[in-house]
Image: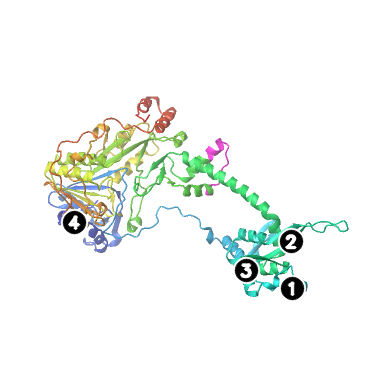
Amino acid sequence: MPEMASNEGSDIIMDKFLKDAWATPPSSPGTSYSELELSPYTHGMRISIENDEEFFNFPTTARAKSDTDNNAAESKKHSNDSIKCDCDIHTSPSNQHLPEIKILEENKNKRRKRNTDNWKREINKKKRMLGEEYIGFRKVQNKIVQDVPRMKRVLNKSICAKACKKSKTFDCKRFSEQQRKHIFANFWKNINWQQKQKYVCSLVHVQNTKATKRSKLKKSNSFAYFLKDGTERRRVCKNMFLSTLGLKAWTVRSWLTNTQVSCSSKKKRNSTKNSKKKLVKNFLASLPKLPSHYCRSTSSKLYLEPVIETKSQLYSLYKNNALELSLPVVSRCYFDNIFSEENISLFKPKKDECNTCIAFKTGNISEAVKLCPKLNASAAYYKTKLAVHNFTAYNLVTKEVVCYWFDETAADLKSSTFANFYMDYISSILRKDVKPVVIYSDGCTYQNRNSVVANALLRLAIEYNVDITQKFLVKGHTQMEVDSVHSVIERKLKNRQIYLPSQYISTTQESRRNPFPYIARELDYTFFKDYDNKEYQLYESIRPGRKKGDKVVFDLRVLKYSSDASINYKLSFESTFLELPHRPKRKWNKNTPHALYLSRIPIQKSKYQHLQELKHVIPSDCHYFYDNLPYKQ
């Protein structure tokens, strides 16, 4: 991978470089834009330890194929002066504020929902409901064909009998043409079919006819028709009623006789539909889920465990479960609609990408959390499992990789946990050779951009008498080389069953052979120190403002930790360093912090019981580990 040099030192303008990479023609002779190969990486945190000059890798690097030899020679030339490494927690999302580059946000990763309003059949139904011209249906040789043009509903002229005009019972003469037009327009333009039926039924009074001894019954019911004059109902003749509403007699009679039956059957259908929907929701609720690590501060969405990879697999699992319990099975389409309504998703979180980078996307992002046990047995689908995390450090010069593996009983995902990784890895390098350190990281608050990590890095700067600069990459360009390690490990884990967390260690070591295997460390609770303790911190806050409305931590772009126990900041890569408005403490504890945990962290009792239930599909020599897991009583 080519390295690009700059003589601007630690003040290199990151976002300007990102723009210039696209705007500036290639400097090498014989290289054109058509020969540039884009190499995307997933987001992470980059560390650069330097002597005289500062080097960094462009997050979406323009790599010229014709300059391979030149780049290799340039890299070899500076290999003795610069050591670079990448670090990334496998569970670290980025959720950051971007003052530098305005990126058009798009609705990404959202399942498109069907819009029935644009369907031809639905448009035709709507036209029919509004009284407009539409295409009707007819039956041809036991087939339903839609090819019958229907005329537009119009207000017909009322033809009342002479007796009706003179009658004191009917008030047809009280309705003017203007009133009839208003009633007609309101009936066809403002209400749906169900409301139309209720409206007609409320204006027609049905009476049972009585038979006399002299005459036989010709009809069982008689109808009295009414129209509304404001809020008052006035009786009119049948012709006036039908012509004003633009209806036919058989339509009114059908609505009057079938409304009660249709309402009761509709309730029955709705109750059946709701019961099926409830069964699907109960099934989805029974599946184990994981919280979002990528936007936990702004999203409450839960993710299904990565043992379920596709919706087809999920639907098959639901169908088999329903058949075993003799429950009704809904269609795949209806199942997907219910799944979309719930606040859950398949576990495929993606890194933040800008509109330019997403066009050159080449592969899937590896999972953000590993599970143990990792089984192919169907019994594992309904059980919660032990979460295992991986923090990876990558040295770009030596290509040395260190993976820190730990499960949820060793540590949780809080700022002090990540501060321990910073302290351990950077101090191991500084013990060999003291050089200025530049850290490139995303803006994830609980992981990178917080006062706990800032104070831990300041302790390192004071202890080794070296300046440490931490730069927060622009959103959309936080993809890092370290994610190649995760990808290699992911391929090695494919189709492999994991029974113990220690198997992730051996798998990591087997994932690469050349130039040398990955270094994997399995951590327990004794590794972690309490850097969150205020006694060991110089600065209580790294906020660049004091009052309401001032800049906040999200606005920080660069932090510089100096050996004189001071922290300076930048709000943009182009600006100059400013001193934090908060004064450091005069007295603070310089000793190594106390242990963060006194014992293993207990898991939930329900998770412990689920793991015990999975022992019948786990080899017996692994049972001891699960029997000794701490859990909440």
Tell me which label, 2 or 4, sits earlier in the chain: 4
Please state which amino acid type lies under the numbered disc 3.
Answer: Ile
| Image-based side of 323 in relation to 221, left or right | left
- The 10 Å Cα crowd at callout 3, few under 14, some 14 to 19, many 20 or more, is some
Say which element carries label 2: strand
Mark 4 to mark 1: distance in Å?
A: 94 Å
Q: Is residue 276 above or below residue 259?
A: above
Q: Is residue 156 visible?
A: no
Q: Are marks 2 and 4 in contact (CB under 8 Å)?
A: no
Q: Earlier in the sequence, mark 2 or mark 3?
A: 3
| Residue pointed to by mark 3 | 183
Residue indicated by mark 4: 12
| 602, above or below 66, in the image | above
Q: Earlier in the sequence, mark 2 or mark 1?
A: 1
**Residue in the foreground of this view, choosing between 284 and 425:** 284
User: Which residue in the protein does label 1 denote?
Assistant: 165
Q: Quadrant of residue 199?
A: bottom right
SS category of the residue bearing label 3 = helix
Under mark 4, the amino acid is Ile
Per the rendered image, the range of residues in magenta is 319-333
Q: How many numbered discs?
A: 4
